[in-house]
Amino acid sequence: MAIAGHVGAVYIETTDPPAAFTKEATEANAYFTQYMIIDTTKRYWDKNSPVLVYVNDELVSNGFEIEHCGGVIVFEEALTSADTVTVSGMSVSVAQRGGFFNWSLELTSDTSDITTFHSDGWKENLTTIKGFTASAESYWGDSEFVQSLGKEVIIALFVDNTASKKRYEGYAVISSDSIETAVDDIVNESIEFEGSGRLYYRED
């Protein structure tokens, strides 16, 4: 599955140490299944630190997934409008170090053949690994961006070039960087990303 878009950004963790936050408020989606931390400065959580989830001030330990990139808690079963969800953990500080447009995104899924004698002659497959790759052109980046080649960064791929914040967001590794130029043309740069974990769709 391929997706193309207009503008994007690369965010890199700063050298600031992770900062603790305690019982920060969240905002629910329309279905009361996803709860995003309200404080936008704390939406990227340290993947190596525990995240504590509270429902109506009671600590819960299962029935949800944690999305460190974006600061979201996803519940397996919907809560109600009367429920409040708060979170505690460690947030990391990020800064934009690159920008681009004309990006493309490829979602992939690896499968394994599990055909047996009981498959009635039909080939059967099992999904084993999911992932994504992305490429972009005409980006800008400072020296810290260039030094991050081969390292994990956060990419945001916006689906339009308006004030909308609709985007795909996730962790990725900068896998390659190429520069081309002709004597009568401007410098053209392209960059390739290899997904590191899940890719999320955000609207705020």
Image (cartoon, rainbow, N blue to C red):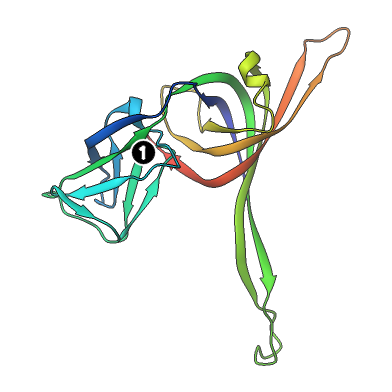
Residue at 62% of width from left, 46% of height from top?
Answer: 132
On screen, residue 23 above or below 11: below
- Outermost left residue: 82
Q: In which quarter of the image is the C terminus?
A: top left
Place residue 184 in its image quadrant: top right
Instruction: State the image coordinates of residue 114 (x, y, percent, origin top left).
Output: 67, 78
Q: Is residue 142 left or right of residue 171?
A: right
Residue at 56% of width from left, 18% of height from top?
Answer: 97
Instruction: State the image coordinates of residue 48 (x, y, percent, origin top left).
Output: 45, 42
Instruction: State the image coordinates of residue 88 (x, y, percent, origin top left).
Output: 27, 40
On screen, residue 32 above or below 43: below
Tally of numbered tags: 1
Place residue 112 in its image quadrant: bottom right
- Can residue 204 be seen here? The reply is no
Residue at 59% of width from left, 56% of height from top?
Answer: 130
| 10 Å crowding of disc 1: few (<14), some (14-19), many (20+) | many
On screen, residue 64 above or below 91: below
Residue that badge 1 annotates: 71
- Outermost right residue: 183
Instruction: State the image coordinates of residue 135 (x, y, percent, origin top left).
Output: 68, 34
Q: In this view, does 26 lie to the left or right of 117?
A: left
- Outermost top residue: 184
Instruction: Name the residue type under label 1.
Output: Gly
Camera-side residue: 191 or 44? Answer: 44
- Can residue 139 be seen here? The reply is yes
Q: In this view, does 78 lie to the left or right of 136?
A: left
Camera-side residue: 64 or 127? Answer: 64
- Helix, strand, or loop for circle 1? loop
On screen, residue 5 above or below 93: below
Residue at 60% of width from left, 66% of height from top?
Answer: 127
